[in-house]
Image: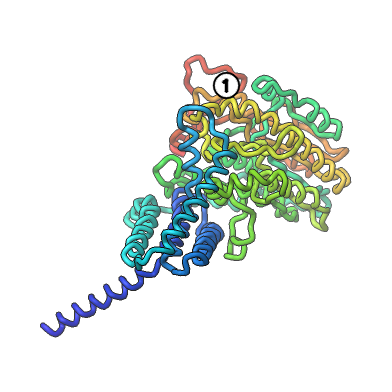
């Protein structure tokens, strides 16, 4: 027994010695660089995949290795270089926090270019001081290395803690039935019958569905922003477009609106009661979960997609980077080569890289800016040529949605250092001056966007010899009067009033396409007129999502006329 006990003691001592030796190797610069990536991923895990971590982690590690290597040139010691590298790594990572802290101080508003220049100068000075002190130091830094390694691992642990409770709940909760309603098969008999149609002798034009996110209707632009959009609408009409000057969305958020439009069904009847069975409890995480489920099961595999697939259409879509309409990576290769994602944009916004890009992007086109990504999107659209099979082209254009990308002349509108840093409208709406910023720059963005849309639409009509269906439509209106904390105070007419312009080839009937049509009836009406089908349409209604992810009907408030009792009709509570 005594020999066995001695062996165990020696074994533990050996393990401790090995562990201590490993911890003397400074890996903490890599951990410090990776922590913000992992932390933001955990916060937004309900709308991300593990593969979304690949590129950001590689970039963060590359920054760390670069800073470490640069430091090694000056101090020629791996442990000393690790300490000096931390000055550079921390300077890159905490820029946004430092700027926002300085911006919030009383006094004159800080100019970001001056702050950025000062920040870079201070970084160089601190780095130089650290290198000098480390070069003359005779310390081994063993104990400090062990301490910083341990601190780095503790940071990673803290970053992952928010995911622990729900994972424990999943392990201990009883098994629940999965969603049983198959979304790949339409639940409506009319859509099933349409899928089985004999398409042999049916004229099947290309269909372009272009979503311009948050593009408001003309009367809203005039009344809320004092902006006259009629020249652009008149141009669309001169090109043969029908413009619905009283059209509205059926829901106030992208994922809800697109789900209803692409499935031609109201969500309280389309979605199964079990949709949120596995959703988290916290509101933002719950909303992210719902958006992800709708995107994967009802937007990317909708009734419209099913019908057009049966009709022999091929599908062309952009990678918006936005969680609702992005192309999810299925391999490491796709994760490395795909478009910059919303997650990566948020990470860049936290670092000193974002203002550096913004300060140079007017002179040097840089693909990480939203402006350049939109220009790439327009270039892709304009280059699509007719195919041997008819095409359904679905492009989600993230403009004029905030943050704004265009000036009136179509050139780049530079980022606002504070407002653009807030990913959630709930956070932005609390910032001083945000509404004024939105009211001033939203119409400028619309004007600049119009110039690019004109060029793209002309090219689409030219490429298709005017034989395509082109839908230029918004998913919801602008956000000036949106009050995220209460449905009762939201400007319903503004949030729901949308641009809705439809081009049909010459000789095509426009039966049922009216100035008041809502987006839920877009595809039934177009398919009925173009393909000769008999798909059902719906009464035009409007719903806001409540705090419990149920739906409050606000149809009677579309003309800014609240109900006499101040209440709203609730449908589908709990979903």
On the image, which quarter does residue 285 sit in? top left
Let me know if residue 497 appears in the view: yes
Quadrant in the picture for residue 170: bottom left
Image spot of residue 186 (x, y percent): 61, 48
Left or right: where does residue 183 sit relative to residue 80?
right
The N terminus lies in quadrant: bottom left
The residue where tag 1 is placed is: 557
| Foreground residue among 122 and 494 | 122
Q: Is residue 389 above or below residue 520?
A: below
Question: Front-most of 335 and 388?
Answer: 335
As drawn, is 461 to the left or to the right of 360?
Answer: right
**Up-down: is 336 above or below 182?**
below
Q: Tell me residue 269's x, y (percent).
A: 54, 39
Residue at 58%, 65% in the rendered image: 331
Left or right placement of residue 408 versus residue 324 in this view:
right
Question: Residue 364 or 464: which is nearer the viewer?
Answer: 364
Say which residue appears at 72% left-offset and 25% top-offset: 218
């Amino acid at each position: 027994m005594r020999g066995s006990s001695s062996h165990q003691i020696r074994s533990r001592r050996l393990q401790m010695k090995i562990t201590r030796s490993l911890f003397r190797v400074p890996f903490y610069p890599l951990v410090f660089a990776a922590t913000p990536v992992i932390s933001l991923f955990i916060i937004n895990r309900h709308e991300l995949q593990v593969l979304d971590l690949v590129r950001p982690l590689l970039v963060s590690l590359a920054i760390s290795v670069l800073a470490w290597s640069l430091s090694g040139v000056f101090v020629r010691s791996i442990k000393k270089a690790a300490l000096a590298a931390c000055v550079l790594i921390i300077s890159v990572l905490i820029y946004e926090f430092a700027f926002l802290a300085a911006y919030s101080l009383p006094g004159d508003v800080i100019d970001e270019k001056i702050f950025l220049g000062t920040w870079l100068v201070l970084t160089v000075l601190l780095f130089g001081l650290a290198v000098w002190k480390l070069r003359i130091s005779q310390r081994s830094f063993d104990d400090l290395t062990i301490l910083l390694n341990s601190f780095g691992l503790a940071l990673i642990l803290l970053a992952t803690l928010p995911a622990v409770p729900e994972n424990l709940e999943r392990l201990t909760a009883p098994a629940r039935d999965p969603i049983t309603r198959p979304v790949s098969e339409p639940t409506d008999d009319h859509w099933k019958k349409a899928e089985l149609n004999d398409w042999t002798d049916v004229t099947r034009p290309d269909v372009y569905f272009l979503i311009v996110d948050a593009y408001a209707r003309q009367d809203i632009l005039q009344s809320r922003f004092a902006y006259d959009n009629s020249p652009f609408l008149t141009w669309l009409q001169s090109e043969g477009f029908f413009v619905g000057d009283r059209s509205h969305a059926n829901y106030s958020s992208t994922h809800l609106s697109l789900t209803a439009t692409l499935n031609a069904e109201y969500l309280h009847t389309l979605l199964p009661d079990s949709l949120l069975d596995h959703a988290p409890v916290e509101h933002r995480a719950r909303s992210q979960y719902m958006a992800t489920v709708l995107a994967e099961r009802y937007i990317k595999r909708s009734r419209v997609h099913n019908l057009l697939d049966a009709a022999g259409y091929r599908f062309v879509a952009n990678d918006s980077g936005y969680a609702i309409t992005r192309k999810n990576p299925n391999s490491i290769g796709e994760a490395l080569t795909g478009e910059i994602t919303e997650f990566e944009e948020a990470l860049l916004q936290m670092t000193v890289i974002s203002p550096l890009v913004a300060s140079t992007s007017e002179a040097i086109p840089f693909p990480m800016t939203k402006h350049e990504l939109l220009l790439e999107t327009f270039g892709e659209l304009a280059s699509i040529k007719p195919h041997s099979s008819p095409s359904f082209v679905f492009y989600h254009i993230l403009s004029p949605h905030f943050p704004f990308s265009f000036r009136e002349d179509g050139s780049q509108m530079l980022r606002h250092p504070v407002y653009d840093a807030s990913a959630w409208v709930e956070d932005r709406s609390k910032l001083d001056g945000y509404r004024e910023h939105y009211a001033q720059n939203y119409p400028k963005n619309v004007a600049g966007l119009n110039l690019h849309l004109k060029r793209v639409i002309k090219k689409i009509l030219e490429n298709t010899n005017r034989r395509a269906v082109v839908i230029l439509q918004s998913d919801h209106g602008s956000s000036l009067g949106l009050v995220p904390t209460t449905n009762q105070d939201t400007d319903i007419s503004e949030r729901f009033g949308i641009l809705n312009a439809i081009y049909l080839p010459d000789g095509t009937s426009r039966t049922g396409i009216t100035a008041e049509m809502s987006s839920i009836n877009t595809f039934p009406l177009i398919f009925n007129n173009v393909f000769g089908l008999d798909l059902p349409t719906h009464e035009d209604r409007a719903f806001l999502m409540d705090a419990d992810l149920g739906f409050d009907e606000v149809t009677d408030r579309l003309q800014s006329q609240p109900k006499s009792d101040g209440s709203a009709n609730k449908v589908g509570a709990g979903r």
